[in-house]
Image (cartoon, helix red, strand yellow):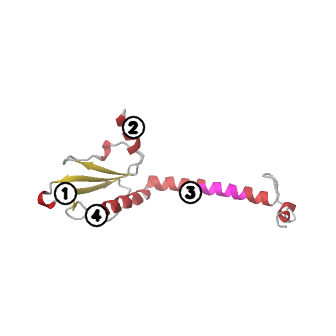
Amino acid sequence: SPQLQRKRHIGNDIVAIVFQDENTPFVPDMIASNFLHAFVVVQLEQGGSQGTLYKVSVTARDDVPFFGPPLPDPAVFRKGPEFQEFLLTKLINAEYACYKAEKFAKLEERTRAALLETLHEELQARSQAMLGLGPDDERPDNGAAAPGFFESFK
């Protein structure tokens, strides 16, 4: 179904921007996701002679630290480059803050450990090849390098 396709894309994001046409309450739990940690909600306000105005609110999971820039009081912005700058900055900072949440910190730690293990294995294999050792060979007891090492420097 089209709704399932949309959910598949939205559910893998960390930060979502929600645009509401009317003043309806936004409940983050409406979107089931293990990844979404922050929402920036933008609502169209009646600006009249002031032009187009947008009201902004932000919500995030409890383990996401505060991220700036802080919302002004009232959090209403006139359409224009200043609002674009504020919104983009807020979204980027939200993403960075979400990475500090427990879930993403654990994922990052696990990823780094796997990358370090792969690097170690690759360096070990290349060192053994340079020394002329097979994967299971030991370095000679007298500390001398295998002939392959010196042969590679002619």
The answer to which of marks 1 and 2 sits earlier in the sequence is 2
Callout 2: SS: helix
Expressed as whole percent of the image width and height from the top left, the position of residue 76 reads 21, 60
Q: Quadrant of the N terminus?
A: top left
Dividing the picture into quarters, in which one does residue 83 lie? Answer: bottom left
Type of the residue with mark 3: Arg
Type of the residue with mark 4: Pro
The answer to which of marks 4 and 1 sits earlier in the sequence is 1
The residue singled out by tag 4 in the image is 81
Q: Up-down: is 50 above or below 22?
A: below
Q: Nearer the viewer, residue 34 or 93?
A: 93
Q: Residue furthest top?
A: 1
Q: Nearer the viewer, residue 91 or 136?
A: 91
The residue singled out by tag 2 in the image is 5
Disc 4 versus disc 3: distance between alpha carbons? Answer: 38 Å
The answer to which of marks 2 and 3 sits earlier in the sequence is 2
Indicate which disc residue 79 carries.
none
Disc 3 versus disc 1: distance between alpha carbons? Answer: 46 Å
The residue singled out by tag 1 in the image is 52
Magenta stretch bounds: 115-124
Q: Residue at x 31, y 60 (%)?
A: 87
Q: Residue at x 69, y 56 (%)?
A: 122
